[in-house]
Amino acid sequence: MKLLIIITSAIALLVIGFATLPSSKIIESDTQGKVIHTSEHEIQQPGNYPVTKTEAEWKEILTSSQYRVLRKGGTEFPYTNEYYDNKEDGIYACAACGQKLYSSATKYKSGTGWPSFWEPLDKSFVQEKEDNSLFMKRIEIVCSNCGSHIGHVFDDGPEPTGLRYCMNSAALNFIAKSTSPTN
Ligand SMILES: [Zn+2]
C-alpha cells in the first residue's frame, strides 16, 4: 500500500512537472513545416504604412506560411523554399501588398539556401529595422509599403554594394519577365 502511494505520488509529480514546463515560443513549425518561427515581435503599429490591415484581415488573404513570415517575423527553412534557386528573369514583389522589391538582375547564389540579392529595386522600397531576437543583433528588412517582414540584410554580400539581402520566398511573389505587364 505504501509503495502504491509512493508510485502514485511520483507519477503525479511528473505530470505536474511536465504541465508546468514553459512551452517553447522561440521556434515552432507551421502545419506545412516550412517556416521556422523565430520571433513573436509585433511587425508594425497600424497606421505607420500606406497599406494597413488588421491582423485578422492579413490572416484572411495570406497563406499560413506567408502569414508567419510576413506578419510574425518567421524565417523559412533554407534550400526547401520556392525561390532560393530560381534563375528566371523577373521581379520579386512583396507577397502581402504587391510592392516590387527586387530584380532577378541583382539576385545571386549566396550558398545560404535563401533567395539573396545585393540590392533592392529602390532603397525606398524597403525599410531597415533593428532586430535583437534570438540573441542576435540583425538588421531586419520590412516592406516600406505595408510594413511586412521580408528578411534580413547582412554586410557579407558581393560587390558593388557588399550587401546580402537574405529574403524569405514566402514573403515574395515572383513575376516572370515574360508575364510581367511592365516588360
Ligand atoms: Zn508589402
Image (cartoon, rainbow, N blue to C red):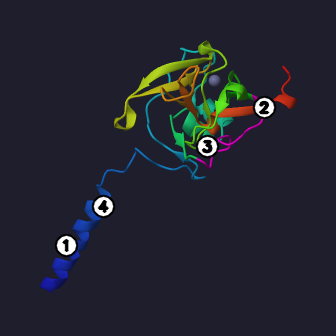
Mark 2 vs mark 4: in front: 2
Please provide the residue range marked out in magenta: 79-90
Residue extending farthest left: 2
Comparing 177 with 7, the one in front is: 177
- Image quadrant of ligand 1 equals top right
Q: Which residue is mark 1?
A: 9
Q: Which residue is mark 3?
A: 64
Mark 1 vs mark 3: in front: 3
Please say if 65 is above or below 31.
above
Q: Residue at the spot x=57%, y=53% of the render?
A: 33
Whole-angstrom CA distance, mark 2 to mark 3, is 27 Å
Whole-angstrom CA distance, mark 4 to mark 3, is 29 Å
Q: Whole-percent x and y of residue 108?
A: 64, 33
Q: Mark 1: few, some, or many residues within 10 Å (few <14, many ≥20)?
A: few
Whole-angstrom CA distance, mark 2 to mark 4, is 52 Å
Numbered disc 3: secondary structure: helix
Give the residue type at disc 1. Ser
Q: Is residue 57 magenta?
A: no
